[in-house]
């Protein structure tokens, strides 16, 4: 009786099939597809959740950094005039007529202040100009609009104002990014670097990077020996010491920041100790807080566990015999460390430094509470524009730049460490 | 860890220095957390040790800041402390109000994050999962993206979606922030999970749901619980999102501390901080017990 094997052996080259006659390849493909769908099905609810509560809001915020329809929505006539014409000089009667009509309407709708604020982002003084003009706009009953408006306030005859308005007439704008990069438009509408005294953000980004690098460096210097000790002690001692690392890690951020305020303020514990020991005089108390040092000290403390934990998990896997072997082969302690031990811990160093740097770059709470004005980071400026100056477009543009930087670092981290190798506790 | 007999003098000195340095680092880590505990019992409104405290004079210590913690915001804090007084505290004390909010929001967001996160981790740890790396990167990203950016995004999104100043909005946001921790801990636990157990259960006739309930869940439970603890702590400690999207009604403990530090800092904050430190010690202990249990289940150590 011929079996399946016989048929194949006999040279009947029909494809292998399953019991019901489907080719094996198709059946396998179907089974794989089903397994893939099952896996996807399990992940789908969470994926959907994260997209709705995380990806969409952030995408929306990014859109706000290039989209601001305040001017074009509330000044429709003037906007369409400005879009149709090239503003190279102060325009004539048509534009002023559109301006007066729009401003009258904006006054009725109470939107004139918003419109003024939008122009004020790029030309200071515009808010009060719009407000004061709107207040008196009813006096202008008919033509000639231009002369009457100029009589109300001669700032309306300024070319710079008109070029700013002509850019604002388009709802999509690069103005917020320009401002976030310390660029501005000159009177001719060309992009130039902002005047020296108004270059805030470049300096702030630089400070954020430098302070984060400093914090990461300090964490490495403090964390490396500590992690080494933890990895080399017998388990029952190292578990005990580990508590000293994990307790700060699990303690509320605000608690730790509060502690540093208690310790560092000029009437605080540290200064009092130094004064009572006689190292400092009573008027010579150190200013350790409400400046960059406050930010650096408190952040180093907060980030240190993020450095020690990945270092520890790598050092744990380095066999102790290697250093001993190097020593027995004649290497001095320094050589054995530099050429045998250190290279094996590089993955841990990379993971720790990157993690600390990524978290530091976007840090907000601690700098806001202990940083004073010189210890503020870019996040604090974003919060300032979100909650106080209400320049949301600029906040979104700064956020987008920060996000870009963090994503780059995150990608690097994924490349070097792998997100699925992240360890907690 | 004594030195071997052949160690040179230089090595001995170096070793001493190294140990001293490490001791310094561990002191740096723990001292700020320990120091606030005695200071919270200060009888004076200062943030430093008074002469009486250093002399261990009982007069230098008091519970007044803990009392203030309880009574702050009450309508009649000086009344006789009977049932009505406690009812007043429960209803009106600002810190109790904040604590109630913190726990409600923390527990609800933890439940969401843990349920969705565990389910997703089960899918992610299947070898057949398509686009595993990309999906994982997206799901972990709420942990990496600066809080201020997430909060800004949510601020705009919620004001359009009508979720601003609502509990639901904050719970959803905190669940989103806690999810990466659940994913990380549960996938790590599943990595050590013997998949043949699933096949064994299936071949013995168990349905997928039964297999999950009777085989998978008991084994990964420690990972799930520690993920849930991480998610809870994330929510319990979160202040930026609350600052951006909450109203006074949803005031939480961290926000209350934030306001306290910014406006009128008093040792009341230290009393609150001390209670939170005790709370984190309790959490850490739970986590350690869980870790030991996992190791015992895997037969690693006693």
Image (cartoon, rainbow, N blue to C red):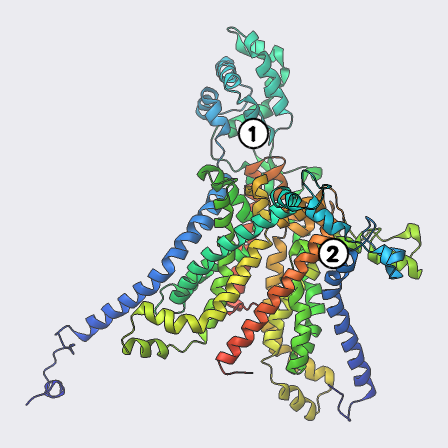
**Residue B151 rendering spot, x and y as whole percentages:** 54, 46
The residue under label 1 is A118
- Between circles 1 and 2, the one closer to the viewer is 2
**Residue A397 rendering spot, x and y as whole percentages:** 55, 42
- Label 2 Cα crowd, 10 Å radius (few <14 / some 14-19 / many 20+): many
Query: For the image shown, how many numbered marks are present on the structure?
Result: 2
Which mark, residue A338? none
State which quarter of the image contains the C terminus of chain B. bottom right
Structural distance between the alpha carbons of marks 1 and 2: 42 Å
Task: Say above or below: B285 vs A136.
Answer: below
Q: Left or right? Give the position of A21 relative to A99.
A: left
Q: Which of the chains bears the disc numbered 1?
A: A
Hey, which quadrant is residue B121 in on the image?
A: bottom left
The residue under label 2 is A259
Residue A408 can be seen in this image: no
Q: Nearer the viewer, residue B214 or B161?
A: B214
Q: Left or right? Give the position of A390 relative to B215.
A: right
Q: Are marks 1 and 2 in contact (CB under 8 Å)?
A: no
Mark 1 or 2 closer to N-term?
1
Q: Nearer the viewer, residue B211 or A351?
A: B211
Task: Say above or below: A150 vs A57.
Answer: above
In percent of the image, x 55 and y 54: which residue is there?
A: B235
Q: Which of the chains bears the disc numbered 2?
A: A
**Residue A74 rendering spot, x and y as whole percentages:** 48, 24
Residue A216 can be seen in this image: yes
Mark 2: secondary structure: helix
């Amino acid at each position: 009786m011929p079996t399946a094997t016989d048929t194949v052996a006999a040279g009947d080259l029909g494809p292998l099939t399953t019991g019901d006659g489907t080719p094996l390849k198709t059946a396998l493909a179907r089974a794989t597809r089903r397994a893939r769908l099952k896996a996807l099905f399990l992940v789908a609810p969470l994926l959907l959740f994260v997209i709705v509560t995380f990806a969409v809001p952030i995408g929306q915020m990014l859109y706000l950094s290039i989209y601001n329809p305040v001017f074009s929505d509330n000044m429709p006539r003037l906007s369409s005039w400005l879009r149709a014409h090239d503003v190279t000089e102060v325009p004539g009667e048509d534009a002023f007529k559109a301006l007066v009509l729009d401003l009258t309407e904006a006054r009725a709708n109470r939107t004139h202040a918003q419109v003024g604020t939008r122009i004020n982002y790029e030309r200071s003084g515009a808010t009060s100009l719009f407000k004061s003009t709107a207040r008196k706009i009813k006096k202008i009953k008919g033509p000639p609009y231009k002369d009457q408006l100029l009589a109300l306030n001669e700032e309306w005859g300024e070319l710079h104002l008109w070029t700013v308005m002509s850019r604002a007439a388009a709802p999509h704008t690069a103005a917020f990014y320009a401002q976030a990069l310390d660029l501005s438009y000159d009177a001719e509408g060309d992009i130039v670097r902002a005047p020296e005294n108004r270059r805030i953000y470049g300096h702030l980004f630089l400070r954020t990077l430098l302070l984060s690098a400093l914090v990461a460096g300090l964490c490495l210097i403090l964390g490396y020996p500590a992690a080494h000790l933890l990895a080399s002690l017998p388990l029952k001692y190292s578990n005990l010491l580990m508590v000293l690392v994990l307790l700060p890690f699990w303690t509320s951020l605000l608690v730790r920041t509060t502690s540093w305020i208690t310790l560092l303020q000029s009437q605080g514990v540290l200064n009092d100790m130094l004064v009572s020991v006689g190292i400092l005089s009573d008027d010579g108390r150190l200013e350790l807080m409400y400046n960059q040092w406050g930010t650096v000290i408190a952040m180093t403390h907060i980030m240190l566990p993020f450095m020690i934990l990945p270092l520890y998990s790598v050092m744990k896997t380095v066999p102790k015999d290697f250093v001993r072997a190097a020593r027995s082969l004649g290497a001095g302690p320094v050589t054995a460390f530099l050429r045998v031990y250190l290279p094996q811990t590089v993955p841990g160093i990379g993971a720790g430094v990157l993690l600390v740097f990524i978290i530091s770059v976007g840090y907000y709470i601690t700098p806001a509470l202990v940083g004073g004005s010189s210890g503020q980071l870019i996040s604090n400026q974003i919060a300032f524009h979100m909650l106080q100056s209400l320049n949301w477009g600029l906040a979104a543009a700064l956020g987008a730049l920060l996000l870009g930087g963090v994503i780059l670092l995150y990608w690097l981290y994924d490349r070097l460490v792998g997100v699925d190798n992240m360890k907690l506790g | 860890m004594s030195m071997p007999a052949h160690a040179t003098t230089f090595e001995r000195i170096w070793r001493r220095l190294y140990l001293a340095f490490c001791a310094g680092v561990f002191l740096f880590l723990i001292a700020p957390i320990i120091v606030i505990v005695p200071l919270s019992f200060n009888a004076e409104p200062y943030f430093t040790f008074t002469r009486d405290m250093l002399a261990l004079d009982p007069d230098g210590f008091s519970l007044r800041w803990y009392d203030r913690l309880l009574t702050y915001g009450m309508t009649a804090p000086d009344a006789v402390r009977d049932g009505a007084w406690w009812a007043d505290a429960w209803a009106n004390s600002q810190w109790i109000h904040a604590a109630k909010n913190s726990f409600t929001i923390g527990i609800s967001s933890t439940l969401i994050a843990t349920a969705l996160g565990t389910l997703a981790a089960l899918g992610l740890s299947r070898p057949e999962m398509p686009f595993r790396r990309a999906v994982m990167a997206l799901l972990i990203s709420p942990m990496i993206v600066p809080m201020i950016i997430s909060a800004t995004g949510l601020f705009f999104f919620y004001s359009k979606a009508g979720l601003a100043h609502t509990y639901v909005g904050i719970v959803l946001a905190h669940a989103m922030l806690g999810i990466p921790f659940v994913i990380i801990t549960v996938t790590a636990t599943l990595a050590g999970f013997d998949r043949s157990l699933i096949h064994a259960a299936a071949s013995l006739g168990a349905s997928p749901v039964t297999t999950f309930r009777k085989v998978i869940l008991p084994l990964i439970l420690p990972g799930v619980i520690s993920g849930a603890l991480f998610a809870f702590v994330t929510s319990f400690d979160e202040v930026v999102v609350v600052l951006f999207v909450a109203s006074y009604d949803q005031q939480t403990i961290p926000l209350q501390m934030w306001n306290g530090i910014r406006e009128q800092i008093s040792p009341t904050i230290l009393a609150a901080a001390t209670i939170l430190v005790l709370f984190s010690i309790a959490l850490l202990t739970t986590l350690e017990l869980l870790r030991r249990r996992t190791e015992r289940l895997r037969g690693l150590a006693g």
